[in-house]
Amino acid sequence: MAQPADHHFDVIVVGGGAIGLSTGYHLGKRKAKTLVLEQFNFKNQLGSSAGVSRQYRIPYPEEYMVQMALDAQPYWDELQTLTPKTLLDKVGTLWFGDPSVHSTEGNIAEAEQALKALSVPYTSLTAKEIESQYHFRNLPDTYTGLFQADGASIDFRATIETLYQACERDPYTTLHEESPVTAIGQDGKLFNVTTPKGVFTSEKLVLVPGPYIDSVINLLGFTIEATYWNMSSAYFKKTDPKIQYPTWFVFQNAIGSNGNQFYGFPGVVWDHPEYIRVAPDFVIDPLTSPEQRTLVPNPKELAYTSEWVSEHMTGLDPTPYFTSTCLIALSKIANKELLIDFAPPYVPNHHNIVVYATGWAAKFTPFLGKILTELALDGHSTFDISPFKLGYNYFKAI
């Protein structure tokens, strides 16, 4: 049955978080009639867009990831022209810890090699230099580090708001919240997407529902192997108002069930400026489904974080305040953080279904929207996405 004209679009984007809004923004720039569907309210705290700060950094152990961070910079500059708020607070990136440790973030020595290969400037540091220059203490003498000056704290709330307003202003873009997708059918080359607000049709789909990816792609008959982290976070009050930190990450070996990987931010004007955010980069109990998520952080994870702050940071009260969680899906595929690809070929019209799933991608927000737009409209991207392709043997039919 033919749909009303206002129900037909060139592209339907499923997922209205940061990446979905970025995709809507770039599709609008290409004058593609676009519908962005969000199952909750826009700017919610229920998925991987939760929270107000993220880290923008260039160090990665892989050269292709360093290159992606470099390529993202002009798109952040473009987004900055749309708002008076500073989106990237450039305080630098500090990586330090045991140089032999390989963690979810990578490895310090490999990151140095990747930065050298792409001529990205950085400074190598000893444990004593890290303590004297960046306010940490009681570090083992064997620890090393690197500082890269282009790192920043992202005002993620302002980033999402800027993208939302850009989509809202754009004559080619329609935003629907409280619109979970309950069915996806096909009529020839047209997709029929069912939501509580009606059935909408399009020639193209971009699927970016964050940790809820399976609830959408299952409607098309396939799934992605993923685990889910309900990540904890807390703020710690400054006891010395002059104390300031860069964005940082520490690499350490696990102690028992303590993942012992932590990261942190400077004090920021957009959220609790008298406090410093520090968080564990591990979870004690991974989830098997996003429906298991909770808005209450794991108390053991907070206790480990508080202990680390007390032992190794200066100028902070180790009592955690303003606690929260952020839900994220992580790929089980080795060496695959971000998954960017088309649907597998056994899905009808698969070359018109673009999928982005898993990983920590806030630092790439405006650039990923550009990549997904090119894939949807052109069938390929000007950026090399080969490291992020799934390989169809990693999809599972259901």
Image (cartoon, grey):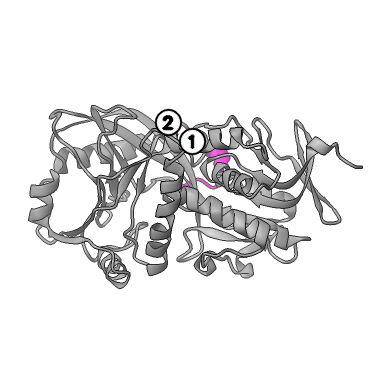
Q: Is residue 199 left or right of residue 215?
A: right
Please give the range of residues in magenta. 286-294
Q: Which residue is mark 1?
A: 162
Q: Is residue 5 left or right of residue 305?
A: right
Alpha carbon separation for disc pair 2 and 1: 28 Å
Q: Nearer the viewer, residue 334 or 208?
A: 208
Q: Is residue 58 left or right of residue 373?
A: left
Considering the image in quadrants, where does the N terminus appear?
top right
Magenta residue check for 293:
yes
* Type of the residue with mark 1: Thr
Q: Which residue is mark 2?
A: 296
* Type of the residue with mark 2: Val
Q: Nearer the viewer, mark 2 or mark 1?
A: 1
- Do we see residue 310 in this rendering? yes
**SS type, badge 2:** loop
**SS type, badge 1:** helix
Residue at the (46%, 36%) spot, across then down: 50
Magenta residue check for 166:
no
From the top left corner, tell me how far across and down residue 271 is, in percent: 33, 29
Query: How many residues crowd around disc 2 within 10 Å: few (fewer than 14), some, or many (20 or more)?
Result: some
Magenta-drawn stretch, dominant element (helix, strand or loop)? loop
